[in-house]
Amino acid sequence: MGKIQMKTTDLFEENRTLAWPYLSEKEHPWELIPDIKEMILKIGETLDPEVYRHPAEGVWIAKSATVAPTAAIGAPAIIGENTQIRHGAYIRGSVLIGEGCVVGNSVELKNCILSDKVQVPHFNYVGDSILGYKAHLGAGAITSNVKGDRTPVCIKNGQEIIETGSRKLGAILGDYAEVGCNAVINPGCIIGQRSIVYPTASVRGVIPSDSLVKAGKGTEVVARTAKK
């Protein structure tokens, strides 16, 4: 089994997102979630007008990005270079999307960071979350960001419980994490680098790096065997 990853420097490589100067200041990445809106507005004001157009207040879209006319983009938002925003995407606001990303059909994003090369291509919901470099969500996979009883979200790592104080907190996916179709990532879940979540799994707590999360009668977490 890989190591437990909860710190920012364990989960993410440097400079794989415009958010890195802000993210790197936080020991744990979820500490940045409440400040995403303010962060985007600050970053937006520094973007090169030769690279980014500024079509609306609080919205910056790279000139090399492709945005479908049916996509809805709320402020504040930044859409990075060579990113695709496909038909029916709903970007509700407070969303930072990196370079070379894919945001697909009927995907809804809210108060989140998508690092460079992230793919959320089909019917996904990502809210109050951070997705690391080259993270990928299969069709229908979602990040659940509110508990059923509406109490503040805790992060549970075995017997350790971290009180976040946030009523809304989705998932933190480390670099290269893969989530299968129709999986549910429950509130406050952390998935380590290179880990793979099987389709239809319901994932809770902290998943070590290089793990497989299997679906079935009960969620099973095992070490991922390196390819030869």
Image (cartoon, rainbow, N blue to C red):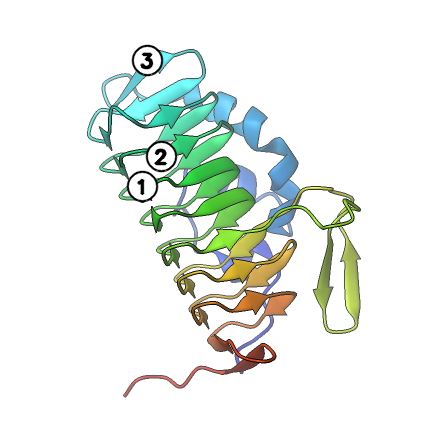
Assess whether mark 3 and mark 1 are in contact (beta carbons under 8 angstroms): no
Labels 1 and 2: the sequence-earlier one = 2
| Residue designated by label 1 | 105
Assess whether mark 2 and mark 1 are in contact (beta carbons under 8 angstroms): yes
Looking at the image, residue 172 sits to the left or right of residue 46; the answer is right
Q: Residue at x 61, y 57 (%)?
A: 186
Task: Specify few, some or many for label 2: CA neighbours under 10 Å numbering under 14, 14-19, or 20 or more.
Answer: many
Tell me the quarter of the image containing the C terminus: bottom left
Q: Residue at x 50, y 78 (%)?
A: 214
Q: Position of residue 3 (x, y in %)?
A: 57, 75
Q: Residue at x 63, y 65 (%)?
A: 204
| Residue designated by label 2 | 89
Labels 3 and 2: the sequence-earlier one = 3
| 120 is higher (above) or lower (below) than 155 | above
Instruction: Judge by depth and name the residue closer to the eye, 99 or 70.
Output: 70
Q: Position of residue 165 (x, y in %)?
A: 78, 44
Q: Secondary structure at mark 1?
A: strand
Looking at the image, residue 189 sits to the left or right of residue 75; the answer is right
Q: CA distance from mark 1 to mark 2?
A: 5 Å
In the image, what residue type sits under mark 3? Pro
Q: Residue at x 41, y 42 (%)?
A: 17
Answer whether residue 92 is visible to the viewer in this image.
Answer: yes
In the image, what residue type sits under mark 1? Asn
Count of numbered marks: 3
| Residue designated by label 3 | 55
